Image (cartoon, helix red, strand yellow):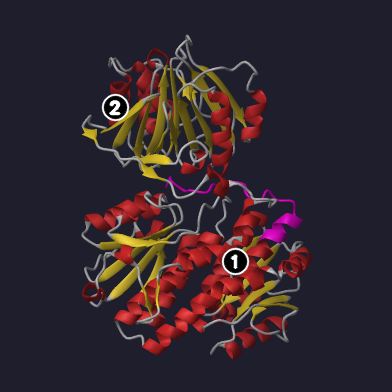
Amino acid sequence: MCGIVGYIGKRDVAPLLLEGLQRLEYRGYDSAGVVITGPKSSGLKMVKAKGRVRDLEARVPKRFAGTTGIAHTRWATHGAPSDHNAHPHMDPENKVAVVHNGIVDNAAELRAKLEADGVVFASETDTEVLTHLIARSQATTLEEKVREALKVVEGTYGVAVLHADFNDRIVVARNGSPVVLGIGEKEMFVASDVAALVAHTRQVVTLDDGEMATLKADDFRTYTTTGTRTTATPETVEWEAASYDMGGHDTYMHKEISEQPDAVDRVLRGRIDDRFSTVHLGGLNLDAREARTIRRIKILGCGTSYHAGMIGAGLIESMARIPADAEPASEFRYRNPVVDPDTLYIAVSQSGETYDVLAAVQELKRKGARVLGVVNVVGSAIAREADGGVYVHAGPEVCVVSTKCFTNTVVAFALLALHLGRIRDLSVTDGRRIIEGLRRLPEQISEILELEDEIKELAAEYAGAQSMMFIGRVRGYPVALEASLKLKEISYIHAEAYPASELKHGPLALIEPALPTVAIVPDDALLEKNRAALEEIKARSGRILAVAHREQEKADHTIVVPKNEDELDPILMGIPLQLFAYHTALAMGRDIDKPRNLAKSVTVE
C-alpha cells in the first residue's frame, strides 16, 4: 500500500528520493519521510512530515547532502497519520533506519517483549518493532541482523534498511509486498514500483517472496532469508518515464480515461486470428485438449477487478458455455472453498500484487488447482505464481481509481471467452461477429469520449445529490456496480448498485426525488424489462439518468452510446460513467487522483 524508494551511488540522493516519492505517491499519501547517509557521513540524517510529499519537501533543509538513502510515502495501517508515525523509523541511537510496506501480524506480541526489555517506542506503528529488532541484534553483518529480525516476524513485508555502521549498502527483503531493484551504471536503486525507477534505469530485478538483496553502488546480490544465494537476471521494463507523466492533462484519471482507445487497441494487437475466427493467447499454457476438460470457471478479484471478473464470467458463459462466476478473493479465502480439479481458477489484479488475490492463488496452488492470471504488470507476483494467463497491456495506471485497466481487463476476458468458445461450441460465424465487434471498440470509445462536455454538464446537475442508485440487469448489473464504486471512490457521494429486477424486492422504498438513479439500458433482449424498471422509478417521482443506445422516454437525461455486439456492450456502457464520476468529483472540488483513505495497490490484508 505504501511507497518505498532507495538509492546508492555517487549522485546527490535527496532530490532523487523526493522525485521517486512523487511518482509513488499514489501508493500512499498521508505522511512521508527520507533518511540519508554517505561514505563520509558520521551517521544517518532524517526528515519526516505528516501529509503529502510536497510537505516533506518543504521541510528538507538546503544542506542535506548524501549519496545513499531510503524514503517512504505512507498509507496508514498501524497508528494515525503523524510525524512520529511516518517512516523511516530509527532506533534511539540513530544507527538503524527502516522503511516497510506490509503488516507485522505479531507486532503487539513483539512490542510487549521489547518494552519488557526496556525499549521505549517513539511511534504506534508495527514497523518500529523491526527497527528495534535489527538494532538490538548482536550479528556482525547488516544482512545477518536483518535476517535475524525477519525470523521472528509474522506477516507481510517489503523492507529497506540502512545502518550507520554499514553505510556502503542497503539491505532489502520481500514477503508478500513488492520490492524491485533498479540496476544502473555504478549506482543501484530499489523501489516498491518500477514507476520510481524508469526515469533512471529500465533494467530491473523483481524479488520473490522469501528473498533478500544487498545493494552497493557497483554491485548487487540476491539470496534467500536463510542465506542461500539466488540467481537474478535483470529484465527490461516495457514502459518509459513519459508513460508515468500527465501528458498535458490536469489529472492522471483524465489522462487514463482518454488513453482507452489506444489501450484497447494494444490488448487486441497481434492476438486476432481471422483465418479461424479466434484469437491467440500464447501465455495461457492451456492446450485445446485441456481446455475441453474444464467444467467450471471461478474468477477471483477485489474491487474493480472483481467487477471486471463478473463481466468476464458472463462473457465466458455466453460464448464458451462453461459455467462461470466471480467472487471477491478476500471472501473466497476464508470460506473453506471446495477446490474442484475440473475447475479453472482465474485471478484478476491490476497490479498483480493485490494481497487477497495473491493469497488466494497461493492457497489454490497448494491444493493442486490450475490458476490463470489476468494482470496488467508484467512479472508481478500473481503473474509468476499462476500457471499461465493474459496480460491486459493497459500501460501504467497512476490514478488510485482504475479506469483503462478495468476496460482492458474486460476486453481480455472477451478474448479469453472467444478463445475457449471457438475450442468448444462457438461457431465460425459468431467468432467472426465478436472479432468485428472487438475491432470496432477503439473507435466507439473515441466517440464516447467526444461526449465529455455533455457529460460534464450532467455531472454538475447531479453533483448535489447525497446518494445515488445504480441499476442494471444481467450484463448491465456489473457495469452498475463498477460505476457506483467509481462515484463513491472519488466524489464521496454514497452510492449503491442493484440488479434492476430487484428494485421491487426492497430498494424501491428508497426512491424519491432526492435520490437519482443511473440506469444501464442496453438495446438487447431485456430492453423492455429495463424500461419497466424506469416506469417503476418514474411512478415514484425518481430522477433518472440513463446510459442507453437510444433516448429513453422515461429518463430525465440519456447518455447515448454506440451499439456493439450484445456481449461487448458492457465495455462501452461503463466509459461515460467513468467521465460522469470524474466530473462529479471535479465539480465538488475533490482530490481526484488521491481520494481519501485509499491507495492504489492493496498489498496488505
Where residue 350 sits: x, y (%)?
Answer: 46, 56
Q: Which residues are magenta?
A: 582-605
Q: Earlier in the sequence, mark 1 or mark 2?
A: 2
Where residue 58 sits: x, y (%)?
Answer: 67, 26
Q: Compared to 170, does 251 lie above or below?
A: below
Residue identifier under label 1: 483
Residue identifier under label 2: 147
Question: What kind of residue is marked 2?
Answer: Arg
Q: Viewed as shown, does residue 450 lie left or right of 605?
A: right
**Image point (30%, 40%), residue name:** 233
**Image point (55%, 57%), residue name:** 402
Nearest the eye: 419 or 366: 419
| Residue 591 visible in the current orientation | yes
- Mark 1 near mark 2, Cβ–Cβ under 8 Å? no
- Residue 562 sits in which quadrant? bottom right
Q: Compared to 461, does 191 lie above or below?
A: above
Q: Viewed as shown, does residue 318 lie left or right of 46?
A: left
Q: Viewed as shown, does residue 336 lie left or right of 47?
A: left
Which mark identifies residue 156?
A: none
**Image point (43%, 27%), residue name:** 187
Question: What kind of residue is marked 1?
Answer: Ala
Answer few, some or many: residues within 10 Å of disc 2's Cα (few below 14, many 20 plus, some between 14 and 19). Answer: many
* Element at label 1: helix
Where residue 583 sits: x, y (%)?
Answer: 71, 60
By secondary structure, the bulk of the magenta-drawn segment is best described as: loop
Q: Compared to 219, does 106 lie above or below?
A: below
